[in-house]
Image: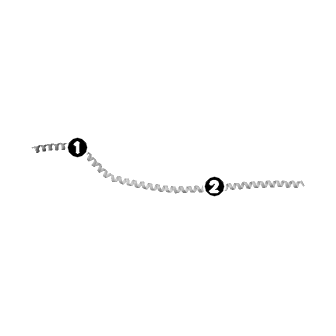
Amino acid sequence: MIIEIALCVGAVALTVLVGSLVPLLRQLRKPVAQSEYLLVHINAELPLLLKEMRATTENLNALVKHARDGVEHAAVLLHAAGTVGDTVQRVQETIQGTSRSFLIRLVSLVAGFKATTGVMKTHIHREEGAINGK
């Protein structure tokens, strides 16, 4: 009889356990179904998304490479422009120095010419005075 009571108590406990687990399992069934649906969609869309990310990364790497090449070409161009600027500055300095030297020589020549004409005028006036004074 003890065995029968134990079996009855066990059956009642099992019934209570199953009775409490059934509503819990019904509640868990919806989130599990939604999770499965989500995983199926993620598995379907993830490869496409990864392909697009790879393509975008490759495009970005190509763009960066082109930008680097452009910067290198611009650096060469700017270096050449700087060299041309230095050359122009040297030519300008040379021309300024030559023109100053030319102007100094011209002024010296004019001053010498004036001095020569002054001396000649003085000498001619003295000679005319000597001829007239005889």
Label placed on residue 38: none
Give amino acid for label 2: Glu
Give the SS element for disc 2. Answer: helix
Total count of labels? 2
Q: Horizontal and vertical percent for residue 8?
A: 13, 43
Residue 3 vs 64, above or below: the answer is above
133 sits left or right of 84 in the view: right
Q: Which residue is drawn at 13% across and 44% down?
A: 6
Q: How far apart are marks 2 and 1 (CA)?
A: 96 Å
Image quarter hosting the N terminus? top left
11 sits left or right of 85 in the view: left
Seen as rendered, the residue at the extreme left is 1
Q: Horizontal and vertical percent for residue 41?
A: 30, 50
Q: Horizontal and vertical percent for residue 122?
A: 82, 53
Residue labelled with disc 1: 24
Tell me the crowding category of disc 2: few under 14, some 14 to 19, or many 20 or more residues within 10 angstroms, Cα based: few
42 sits left or right of 71 in the view: left
- Say which quarter of the image contains residue 99: bottom right
The answer to the question of whether label 2 and label 1 lie on touching residues, with beta carbons closer than 8 A, is no
- Say which quarter of the image contains residue 103: bottom right
3 sits left or right of 85 in the view: left
Give amino acid for label 1: Leu
Seen as rendered, the residue at the extreme front is 2
Q: Which residue is drawn at 87% across and 55% down?
A: 130
Image quarter hosting the C terminus? bottom right
Residue labelled with disc 2: 93
Give the SS element for disc 1. Answer: helix
* Nearer to the camera, 2 or 84: 2
Q: Residue at x 44, y 54 (%)?
A: 64
Q: Residue at x 73, y 55 (%)?
A: 108
Q: N-terminal of the two: label 2 or label 1?
A: 1
